[in-house]
Image: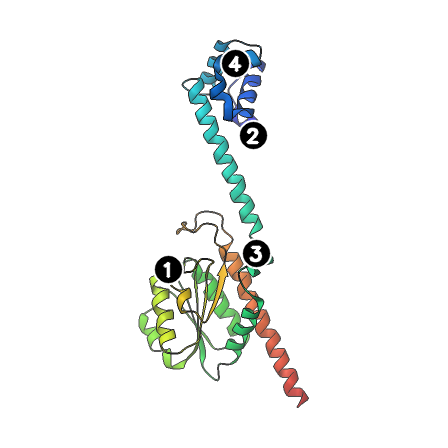
């Protein structure tokens, strides 16, 4: 915790600052030690500690200890959250949950469409990833159709006969619109690929290939906290495109050698 921000505009004396520093360094035992012990440890009086409490905006010594402990806990949690966020930008963390062979298998699904198209479905922030992947594969020569929650259900149902692969993205894996469509695709014997959080979920149950991405904020439905799920999902999309590109090169080389 930055003590300079904590004491800004408080006009503490040197002794009061010394006492505050002592309390912060000994928050786990400060209440047990009590005012008199802390005063003796800092060669000052109990009245100095009470003045410090009031200057800091607290009702008294006990209130100051409780509130400072809360502040330090929040600060520790913020540091932990920040570390998790930064650690998430790591290819190793992506491949921790996904065998690389799954990427190659997905690339084969994409390549073996025989005139049919890939239907990509995602809603909300996941739609950004789904739309990106659909556009990426379209630019690479594949027939793709992207749909989100705002599109008519008829768009999906009328496409089943022409669908060669169903691919969806859902952070929670519990979005009803996504679950219902991947289940329908599965029932119609259409190969299915799902990108979701790392925990087993309703969507992953129907996936022939399930890509798992660590989600540090599983309860954050509004996506208000720092989270690497979506950038990692985009990185996964690029890895899928990379393996598809490699497969195309290999197939072209094989044909050229015939």
Q: Which callout, 2 or 1, points at the residue further toward the start of the chain?
A: 2
Which circle marks residue 250 in the picture? Answer: none
Q: How far apart, in angstroms, are the residues tagged by discs 4 and 3?
A: 49 Å
Query: Of marks 3 and 1, which one's residue comes earlier in the chain?
Result: 3
Q: Which residue is mark 4?
A: 37
Q: CA distance from mark 2 to mark 3?
A: 31 Å
Q: Position of residue 144 (x, y in %)?
A: 46, 74
Residue 234 placement (x, y as % from top left): 52, 61
Q: Secondary structure at mark 1?
A: loop
In which quadrant will I find the N terminus? top right
Numbered disc 2: secondary structure: loop
Task: Specify how the rendered protein is coloured.
Answer: rainbow
Query: In this rendering, is residue 252 above or below 184?
Result: below
Contact check, label 1 and label 4, Cβ < 8 Å: no
Marker count (numbered): 4
Q: Is residue 119 left or right of residue 231?
A: left
* Real-space CA distance between mark 2 and mark 1, rounded to the nearest whole angstrom: 41 Å
The secondary structure type at the circle numbered 4 is helix
Distance CA(mark 3)–CA(mark 1): 23 Å
Is the Cβ of the residue at disc 2 closer than 8 Å to that at disc 3? no
Query: Mark 2 or mark 4, which has the lower sequence index?
Result: 2
Residue 150 visible here: no
- Return the residue at label 1: 174
Q: Which residue is the site of mark 3?
A: 93
Disc nearest the viewer among 2 and 4: 4
């Amino acid at each position: 915790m930055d003590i300079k921000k904590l004491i800004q505009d408080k006009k503490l004396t040197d002794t009061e600052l010394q006492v505050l520093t002592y309390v912060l360094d000994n928050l786990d035992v400060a209440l047990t030690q009590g005012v008199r012990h802390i005063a003796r440890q800092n060669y000052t009086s109990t009245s100095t500690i009470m003045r410090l409490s009031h200057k800091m905006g607290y009702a008294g010594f006990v209130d100051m200890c409780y509130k400072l402990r809360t502040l330090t806990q929040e600060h520790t949690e913020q540091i932990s959250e920040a570390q998790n966020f930064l650690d998430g930008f790591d290819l190793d963390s992506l491949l921790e949950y996904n065998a690389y062979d799954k990427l190659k298998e997905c690339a084969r699904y994409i390549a073996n469409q025989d005139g049919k198209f890939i239907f990509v479905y995602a809603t909300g922030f996941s739609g950004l990833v789904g739309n990106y992947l659909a556009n990426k594969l379209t630019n690479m020569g594949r027939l793709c159709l992207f749909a989100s929650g705002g599109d008519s259900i008829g768009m999906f149902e009328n496409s089943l006969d022409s669908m060669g692969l169903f691919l969806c993205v859902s952070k929670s894996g519990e979005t009803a619109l996504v679950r219902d469509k991947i289940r329908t695709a599965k029932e119609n014997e259409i190969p299915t690929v799902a990108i979701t959080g790392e925990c087993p979920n309703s969507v992953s149950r129907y996936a022939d290939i399930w890509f798992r991405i660590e989600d540090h904020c599983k309860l954050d439905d509004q996506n208000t906290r720092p989270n690497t799920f979506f950038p990692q999902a985009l990185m996964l999309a690029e890895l899928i495109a990379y393996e598809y590109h490699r497969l195309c090169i290999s197939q072209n080389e094989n044909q050229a050698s015939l």
